[in-house]
Amino acid sequence: MLAVLILFSVAAKILYSDKTAIAGTKYFDLNTEIASIERENELLRADYLSSASLMKILEKARELGYTDSSVEYYKAPGLASR
Amino acid sequence: METSQYLPAKEQKFALLRYSVLAVSLIIAARLFQIQVLNSSRYKAQAKEQQWARYTIPAKRGNIYTSDGYPIASSIAVYTLYIDASAVKNPPKLGRDLSEVIPDFDVKNFESSISGKTGWVKTAENLTWTQHQEIEKLGLEEIKMSESYSRFYPENDLLSHVLGFVGKDADGNSIGYYGIEQAYDGYLKGQDGYLFQEKSALGDPILWGGVQEIPPVDGSDIYLTIDRNVQFIAETALKEGVEKYSARSGSVIVINPKTGEVIAMANYPTYSPAVYTDSQENEEVYRNNAISTIYEPGSVMKALTMSSAIDLGIVTPETVYLDDEPKYFSGHKVDNWDEKHHGEETMVEILQHSNNLGAAWVGGRVGSEQLLNYLHKFGFGARLGIDIEGEEGGLIYTSYPLKDIELANASFGQGISATPLQIMSVFSAIANNGYLMKPYVVSKITSSDGDTEVEPEIFSRPISEKTAETMVDMLTQAAAGGEAKYFVLKNFNTAGKTGTAQVPSEGGYDEDKTNATFAGFLSSYKNFVMLVRLEEPSSPSGFAAETSVPLWMGIASKLTNYYSFVPDK
């Protein structure tokens, strides 16, 4: 009876250790994946920020046919000498 | 029998041995005491150094945001590739493999760099995460990559003079230079973390050994008062203006006079903070001329002289001055810039015609003591205290009474020097009911400990509200009927003053070189005050009326659209 109990305990311990090891590996892999996704997000964000820069927006607007508004000042003949 | 007073030879030998053993024991005990007690901390540290490997976990430098929440400077993870030169079996193949991942990888250079070497050789820097992953996939045992952070400026050279850049110090640590990166380096850089791991005698990590980690503390984020759109408008126009008017350089400052918030601060030529160089000859380009360059402001200072006289009740806009001939001050002849004389002129007309003799007359009535007092109150002669690196304080007279010629010159902006920011302070105070606000660029600092908001601060109150109102009217008339009249905005009343000052040279002034300044604001909308300064413009002339004025008006026109102002005329 005692031998069966010991055998059962050992088997349970082995099973538990095995599951813990698998969970640990999964945890490690998940952490690696999180780090990887975070880095990818960082790169995507950088790409987005670059494409949202005002110079890029201006270039795209010009490609689409937008032009600068006419400047609202006037220039009279006989410009001041100073 | 006679007893010998000496011990037998055998016993003498034992005694000698005992004393020797005792002496040696004492020496050993003393040495152990020295090692284990007196020097214990030193040896513990040495042991720890030998038993524990220390790895630095770099802290992420904080981001810098413009007022619209756009991260104009941020940090991105990059990787440095090391190769164990002695472990490389086939250098040409490894070189080819790496060149497929790293576009500009020089295979031949790589082969020579590891040839005949042992140990780890730094092979490539600033690799992206994608490249890092692709190299990992190669499954090479002879490579190692370390992570660090690199500064990323998505708007390239926009706002570079305000931002500064991040370089390395003498120890190879990242450090901010110029602008916000330098002024707020302590907040931005954070605190590196460390990973301690027990190692074997060969230096390899012990699988079941101890691990201790001190996590890094990332740097604080900084929010600026800068409006990215206004900054872009100002920089684009300034670049065009400097080229169009053949100027050496130029600066534009836009400030909210009610708070002192800097809305835009642009300089040209400019640089990209991401690709700065350590070259000394390029150092000039890093300077934020809007706050670092001092120059004689010229006629733009007549606004200060007139404000002082009106504030003291010495003159009113209707006070008349007789401009009939050149005048002599301390034996020096002073004349108007065009050597023309206009007869009886009101104070408004003095501003409109930028009349030197009239300004000198007004300055004479104010007196040197009071004029210096007003200069100080308007922020001249000392730094205004803006929160970025490199601000200069300018030069004004420090003692009075001034000589007549000194007082006359100071009245129309000669013989003193100031930064563009200081010159603009005159107009900021006028636009803000007489209150001069301390200029600032950082509005908020956020860290793990919480947020720190920056509140507007009054620098001084140089003039009364009534004087400020009067000056708004006078400067509006000065712009509409004065030198700026050929370029004033069609639909908006503008209050401002031009300044064309010759550049001092040895023994006098260089007649061919000028600094052209225009500073002012929209009379009905005092949301912003703007200054435009061009250094040595030459096309079509060196005069502010033909260079900095149209540039100012062009930017202001765009800003009226941007802010959706309703025309007031």
Image (cartoon, coloured by chain):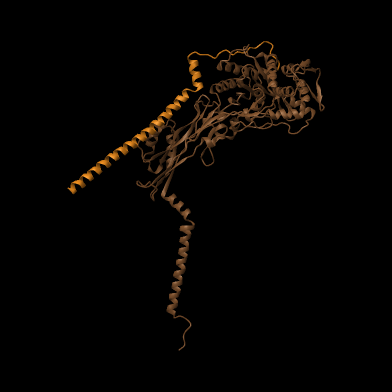
Chain colours: A orange, B brown
How many numbered marks appear?
A: 0
Q: From what the image shows, is residue B175 above or below residue B544?
A: below
**In the rendered view, does B434 fall on the left or right side of B87?**
right
Look at the image and tell me whether residue B558 can be seen. Answer: yes
Q: Nearer the viewer, residue B330 or B248?
A: B330
Q: Is residue A31 above or below residue A2?
A: above
The extreme left residue here reads A1
Question: Residue furthest toward the bottom?
Answer: B1
Residue B425 on image: x %, y %: 65, 26
Where residue A64 appears, as percent x and y from the top left, is 47, 14
Left or right of B45? Residue B283 is right
Q: Nearer the viewer, residue B135 or B356?
A: B356
Q: Nearer the viewer, residue A21 or B432?
A: B432
Where residue B200 appears, as percent x and y from the top left, is 38, 49
Q: Position of residue B202 (x, y in %)?
A: 39, 49
Q: Quadrant of residue B170?
A: top right
Image quarter (top left, top right, bottom left or bottom right) of the C terminus of chain A: top right
Residue B301 lies in quadrant: top right
Give the left or right position of residue B244, taking residue B363 as reference. Answer: left
Residue B277 appears anywhere in the view? no
Vertical order, B558 against B128 (above or below) = above
